Amino acid sequence: MSVSKISKKPLKISLALLSLIFSLLAQAQNFEGQAATGWSWYFDPTSAPSRPQQASATPLSVEARMENLQAIIDRALKRSILDPTPENIAHYINLQNQMADTAHRYAQSWSAVLLKQPQLDYSLIQPTNSAGREVIAAQTLLEQELALEIVAESSGLIFFYRGDCPYCHRFAPILKQFSDFYDIEVLAVSLDGGLLAEFPEPIFDTEKAQLLKVTTVPALFAANPASNTIVPIAFGLVSEDVLRERLVTQLLPEQQRLVKQHFDQAIGEPL
C-alpha cells in the first residue's frame, strides 16, 4: 500500500496508525542516523553492550507520541532536502518504508476485524465497489422519480430570467425538457421584458424577484400553493440531474414522508 493511499484513510485510522508506528519506531535506536535495531532488522541480544538499568520513565501520552513521531519524520525529510547526502535520503526512505510496511499490516488487521464484526463496515451502507454503486444509483433514481411525481401534483416552478442573459437562453431548453418530462408547471418571469422561445408567455414582474431577493439569473424556485411556501432550487446554469436532486432535497417534510412511503411500496413489489 502506497503512502498516498494511507492518507486517504479516515482520521480515526490515521491517528491509530501513527501511534502504532511511533510505538514501533521507539523500539529502535534514535532516528538521528544511527543504525536501527529490532523491528525490520535482525537483532542478536547477546551482542548488545550491557547498559546500566535506569528507572522507568512515565509513559508518554498519545498526544506526545504523535508530536514526537511527526517531529522525527519532519526532521528527516528536511535534512534530506537541505543536505541530500545518500545517507540522509536513505534514512528518510527507510522511515517511509517502515510506515508503509506498518500500514500494510494494520490494514490487514483492520480487514480481519471487519470480517468478525461486519456491523462496523461502513461500505455495507455506502458501497464503494462498482456493483454496489449501481444499486445505490438505481434506488436513488427511483426515489427521485417518485418524488417528482408528487412535486408535479402539488407544486410548480418559478423561473426568473433576463432576455439579455446568455445563460438563461441556454438553461431555458433544459428546464423546458425537464418540466415537460415530469409534467411540472413552470411560471416564467421576465425581468427586462425579454422573451424566450421555450416560454413564449412570461409575465413581466420585477416585484416578485425583489421579494425573493433574486440577484442572479437564471433563478429557479419551487412553489407549493397549498402550503404557501416557496423554496430556492437553482441559480445559474445547471443540468437536469441537478434539478432532479435539488427538487427532491427541497421537498417539504410531508412530501418526503409520501415519497418514502411510495418508495418502500415500489421496492417491495416483485419484479
Image: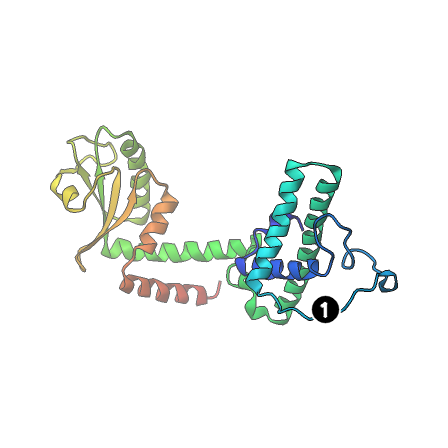
Residue at figure coordinates x 67%, y 64% from the top left: 109
Residue at figure coordinates x 32%, y 62% from the top left: 256
Q: Is residue 194 above or below residue 47?
A: above
Q: Position of residue 159 (x, y in %)?
A: 23, 42
- Left or right of 15: which side holds 148? left
Residue at the far right in the pictured view: 46
Secondary structure under the numbered disc 1 in the rendered image: loop
Q: Is residue 261 above or below residue 14?
A: below
Q: Position of residue 30 (x, y in %)?
A: 71, 54
**Foreground pick, 187 / 269:** 187
Q: Position of residue 97 (x, y in %)?
A: 71, 49
User: Callout 1 environment at 10 Å: few (<14), some (14 to 19), or many (20+)?
Assistant: few
Tally of numbered discs: 1
Residue at figure coordinates x 30%, y 32% from the top left: 167
Residue at figure coordinates x 34%, y 55% from the top left: 249
Res 13 seen here: no
Res 254 seen here: yes
Q: Is residue 65 above or below residue 211?
A: below
Q: Which residue is mark 1?
A: 54
Mark 1 belongs to which amino acid? Answer: Gln
**Foreground pick, 31 / 136:** 31
Q: Position of residue 158 (x, y in %)?
A: 21, 45
Q: Is residue 225 above or below residue 177?
A: below
Which of the colour schemes (rainbow, by chain, secondary structure, one colour) is used?
rainbow
Residue 77 image-quadrant placement: top right
- Left or right of 83: which side holds 42? right
Residue 238 image-quadrant placement: top left
Residue 87 image-quadrant placement: top right
